[in-house]
Amino acid sequence: MGNSKLPFLSFSNLPVINCPGAGECLNYCYSLKAWRYPSAFFRQLQNTILMKDFNIIEQELIKVINTNKFKDVKTIDFRLYVDGDFKNTNDLKNWMNLLKDNSRVNAYGYSKSLNIFKQLIDQEFKFPANYVLNLSNGGKFDYLKPIIQRQSFTRGNFTAVNGTKETIRKQFKKKVFICPGLCGSCTSIGHACGNNKIFKNLEIVIPVH
């Protein structure tokens, strides 16, 4: 698990086929652009196949966090889905239960599969305290955002807009946080998107790329 370009653990699967909430975002999906690199495509494909037996995923994560690199680390940052998304309630529940059992893992991510989150919320499923959700835009289920936003595990909106870092602020009449684009470089205290205290309900905005 991981990506050599990212300063934290991560997991991805194939976009589109694993993105039931994909809508307008398909017009600017950066994950599809990454397919010009065969290694990126085949890593996502491999993980998509492995998700059919989640025990393999679970064993690999436990193996990684117990290596010499991480065994003495109190909090391990983990971006859940750099590419792709939760495909169904079973996948979402499996990930959330795995995080419950591994409290050292501080996971965060972005999702447009809001219908799936809504289904588990309706079932009164208890989400883990070590997972933070960002509500990205451009999905078919954006109308569910007000419901998901009320959940304790939801940090807030992560919005992709047309423009540059210099022009974005003029598009908003409220305070926003501009994502620098290079994940892991935004603040000196860690990932803003994974911080559900300091950045709670603060809209994070990124130029479409």
Image (tube, helix red, strand yellow):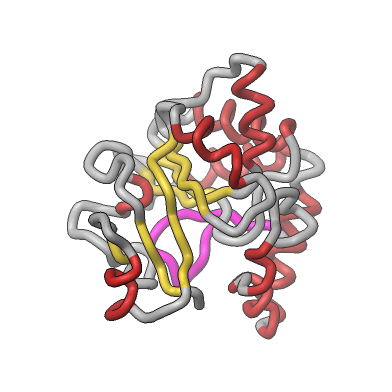
Quarter assignment of residue 167: bottom left
Quarter assignment of residue 51: top right
The image shows residue 173 at horizontal and vertical percentages of 27, 59
Magenta range:
1-13
Residue beneath the point at 27% across and 80% down: 166
The image shows residue 19 at horizontal and vertical percentages of 72, 53
Residue beneath the point at 66% across and 82% down: 37
Residue beneath the point at 59% across and 18% down: 125
Q: Looking at the image, which residue sits at the far bottom?
A: 36
Magenta stretch, main secondary structure, is loop
Residue beneath the point at 47% across and 54% down: 9
Q: Nearer the viewer, residue 107 or 102?
A: 107
Q: Looking at the image, which residue sits at the far front?
A: 173
- Lateral position of residue 116 relative to residue 144, left or right: right
Q: Nearer the viewer, residue 94 or 25?
A: 25
Q: On screen, 199 above or below 197?
A: below
Quadrant of the image containing the N terminus: bottom right
- Lateral position of residue 139 relative to residue 89, left or right: left
What is the number of callouts on the image? 0
Q: Looking at the image, which residue sits at the far left?
A: 188
Would you say residue 197 is visible in this rendering? Answer: yes
Quarter assignment of residue 43: bottom right
Reply yes or no: does residue 11 show up in magenta.
yes
Would you say residue 66 is visible in this rendering? Answer: no
Reply yes or no: does residue 33 show up in magenta.
no
The image shows residue 158 at horizontal and vertical percentages of 43, 55
The image shows residue 148 at horizontal and vertical percentages of 52, 33
Q: Nearer the viewer, residue 134 or 143?
A: 143
